[in-house]
Image: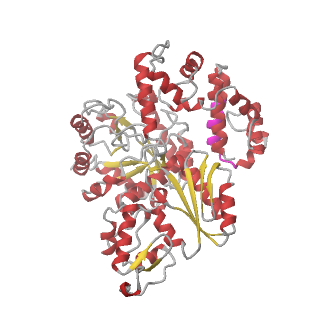
Amino acid sequence: MDKATIADVLEKIATLLELKDENPFKIRAYTNAARSLETFGGNVADLRDEETLEKIPGIGKAIAAKIKELVETGSLKFYEDLRAEFPADILELFSLPGLGAKKIKALYEKLQVSSIAQLHEACVAGRVAELPGFGKTTQEKLSRAITEREKHAGSFQLGAIAGEAETLQNDLRAHPDALHVCIAGSYRRRKEIVRDLDFIVATSAPAEITATFVQHPLVESIIAQGPTKSSVRLRSRIQCDLRVVSATEYPFALNYFTGSKEHNVVLRSRALQRGWTLNEYRLGPVPAIDDSKKKKPTTKIPEVRDEAELYRALELDYIPPELRENCGEFEAAAAGRLPRLIEAENLRGTFHCHTTASDGHNSLEEMAAAAQELGLQYLGIADHSRSSIQAHGLDAARLRTQIAAIRKLNREFDNFRLFAGIECDILRDGALDFDDELLAELDYVIASVHSVFGLSEADMTRRIIRAMSNPFVTMLAHPTGRLLLKRDPYAIDIPAIIDAAAETGTWIEINAAPKRLDLDWRWWPLAKEKGVKCVINPDAHRTERLQELWFGVGIARKGWLTKADVMNCLPLGKIENALATKRSPE
């Protein structure tokens, strides 16, 4: 039972209480407790102590007792009783955009709708449109949302399943019989969308490893269990496969199940050219139908103890997993031209972060402390601008107040700095939300589109390029506006945006929030070729989201980016000059 799981239970209690039309203050108490728990810096073991719990802001005596029960027993009677009052699938309805507790309550009470499948039937029959407060437009939106959900069934955002994946990997690595453990597949290649998880474990005790795997607390159900392969479904609903192999088979299994399929085809072809066969278990001679037709290997088959030796045997430099998409990695590896990809530890700071001044959950001081705890040398604060009304955007007066607060805080820091910025809305015509006089007072400006997504490709592209042409704009955030598995990118000419960034010196963001991971990794080789600089930002709305920089680094690596390509790898002494470069007169 970890903090995230406990917080999730508290959030679900709040949701169920809302369905019951309970006192709003009671509902808010559970929501606030969940948020406080997410930012709690102590260990789960500390949550057994009610006195410690009651010292956490937002957690009173009653909720503290419930958290203690959850930690000690793994369950909570109050929650189970509450769940029993409603059909099992009703919470699924909250995942659909536009459905809150009041509408779900109406659907449940008037139409007996308690699942997405039942809602779809009611929409098709036209019964939803007849309900007060719904109408035909709402019914059509819900139908579209359900169709989109079905289209993405079985797909998961990388960030949505990373916590479970890493926990399970760490627990398997801690097993005394595990020699080597790694997650393979698209997860290891850092694809933004993952359909399943593949665990490869080298061991001499497969039965013991398998038992640990299928009995793990994260496992919701067992799909299949065998001597060398087992499949389970985790709590997040993702399928997770385990393959146990010997130590000698491990490098081949890890490589094969990491993929991609296209990458594996080329690897096998290179092996065949040398008279070898490569599969998930070994590198060996090509089998012959009879001895007379047996093809002799052109060279002796070398010993392979790890993946690096496998690539070396095929006369290639080691290809990092992120690049294994058959997108030029073989040519570069054969010629010794593979780049030294960026590492997470290369980052020295980041810029796209929010505070309680707009729609963030933590103060300036808390965000600065969290950044320093991560070892960062600087942090940029970029709350929303005034047009983002839904995000409590700052007007000019509030922004100037924040700038002053940042300058004051900086006088207290040693070897750390907060930069004052803004996430400035790009208006429909490409103008910015604030005038140049105010933007000049900031250390940097992030330009973003947050509205009017339905423009034509030409109009959207012109809109964004006009904003990038403003000398005070430092970087362009989440350039396509996509929300993975939820919202498609708006129409935009990415090559034209890249050309404009090269011309204006605008940095382009990799938004590291797992729901975005935008700009897509497939565009970065072109951007790099044009000399466009990247900045990896977490779009953090709370302190713990700073750690999502890790996802952004994965996308940068997939895009062939190095430390030199990413601006926030610059140390504090150099980033200040870099921030000033674009706004300096030629």
Q: How is the image coloured?
A: secondary structure
Residue 383 is at least partly visible in this image? no
Query: Which of the 4 quarters of the picture holds residue 15?
Result: top right
Residue 101 is at least partly visible in this image? yes
Q: Is residue 32 magenta?
A: yes
Q: Residue at x 68, y 48 (%)?
A: 42
> Majority secondary structure of the magenta segment?
helix
Depth check, front residue: 314 or 320: 314
> Left of 274 or right of it: where is 343?
right
Q: Is residue 22 above or below residue 210?
A: above
Query: Which of the 4 quarters of the picture holds residue 207?
Result: bottom right
Magenta residues, start to end? 30-43
> Where is residue 159 drawn, in percent x and y?
50, 48
Q: Residue at x 34, y 59 (%)?
A: 565
Query: Which of the 4 quarters of the picture holds residue 559?
Result: bottom left
> Where is residue 261 drawn, in percent x and y?
40, 61
> Left of 515 or right of it: where is 179?
right
Q: Is residue 578 magenta?
A: no
> Where is residue 508 drawn, in percent x and y?
33, 48
Q: Is residue 401 above or below residue 377?
A: above
Depth check, front residue: 225 or 357: 225
> Where is residue 238 drawn, in percent x and y?
55, 48
Q: Is residue 465 above or below residue 17?
A: below
Depth check, front residue: 125 or 456: 125
Q: Residue at x 32, y 71 (%)?
A: 337
